[in-house]
Image (cartoon, rainbow, N blue to C red):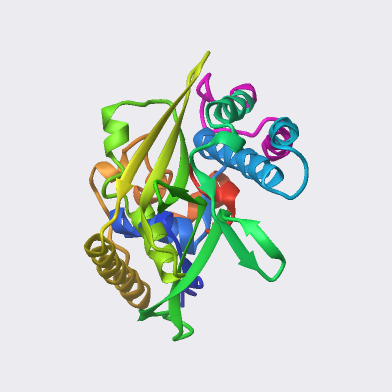
Amino acid sequence: MKTKPPFPEYIDSSMRATMTSCQKQFYWQYLRHLAPLTTPIDLHFGGCFASGLEAARHYFYSPGGTPEEKQSRALAAGLEAILIAWGPPAPATEGKPPAVKTLDTCLLALESYTTQYPFAFDHLQPLSLRTVNGEVPAVECSFALPIPEVLHPETGLPLFYCGRYDMLAKFNNNIFIVDEKTTTQLGPTWTQKWELRGQLTGYCWAARTYGFPVVGAIIRGVAIRKHTIEHVEVLTYRSSYEVDLWYEQLVHDLQRIVNAYQTDYYDYAFNDTCTAYRGCHFQRLCKSAQPERWISTNYREHIWSPLTPKDAPK
């Protein structure tokens, strides 16, 4: 008898997006923990940039020193974090990496960001959170909240929805989620695609659940060009109706994937999802009558960690 892989206890926005687009992809990626032998450069680049920005912010908002002194030292801390996260040698990436997604442009992107939004004068300042260790800035905030309506198929306990957003900040006397996104394209299509983005709505739901009256999200786009870095800021609001609707749909989606696990049948997309962007990594498995034969030579094990910033696409 085939043994079922364990079902995850935590679900995040990336996992949910996968399960709603193709349940079979969810099975291969998040239950069997399969990943291509090479790392997508976009994921690696975004994770390294996020590591650098996190380190720079934590240094700047730590106690002591003048803003002028801390600005340059914060940048240095961020650049060092990028170098460490990038790692020697250069990561093995899928295909020929785009010329713009290099270590040099990642370092340049952080320097450009801190010039565009110098920490001391940034109109988005992180909230101060009271913890057992004292006051800390609301930077790189993680959450994990139970969904009582959906029970884990093995333990019988509620499933957890989790995530990690870049900052919780005040703007115009309101509180917003702040999230940075690296990209190679900016324009009307990019700026408009956040209005119904479930990832951001989930962040707002989580912050409100913790007692913060968040009204929406501010997305800072960092466009990586070959010779320049461009910046744009997008503001989007979330009403109570939108958050409630998002939650209702989340419960429905989670129950569908639990049902799939219990019946051991996962729906195939058989549509543009299979070829979108650079194509699904698991096409080879779906086209084979004996998919298990291809796994050892074409895939590696990678256990997705929803609360690890380097794993989160930016």
Q: Which residues are magenta?
A: 77-105
49, above or below 240, in the image? above
Count of picture labels: 0
- Residue at (49% x, 49% y) in the render: 294
Q: Residue furthest top?
A: 227
- Residue at (29% x, 50% y) in the render: 237
- Residue at (31% x, 66% y) in the render: 250
* Most foreground residue, 43 or 258: 43
Residue 218 in view of the camera: yes
**What x and y, as percent, mark residue 142?**
54, 60
157, above or below 56, in the image? below
**What x and y, as percent, mark residue 307?**
56, 59
- Residue 84 lies in magenta, yes or no? yes
**What x and y, as percent, mark residue 42?**
50, 35
Q: Is residue 308 left or right of residue 31?
A: right
Answer with the quarter of the image where residue 258 lies: bottom left
Q: Is residue 77 left or right of residue 195?
A: right
**What x and y, as percent, mark residue 255?**
31, 74
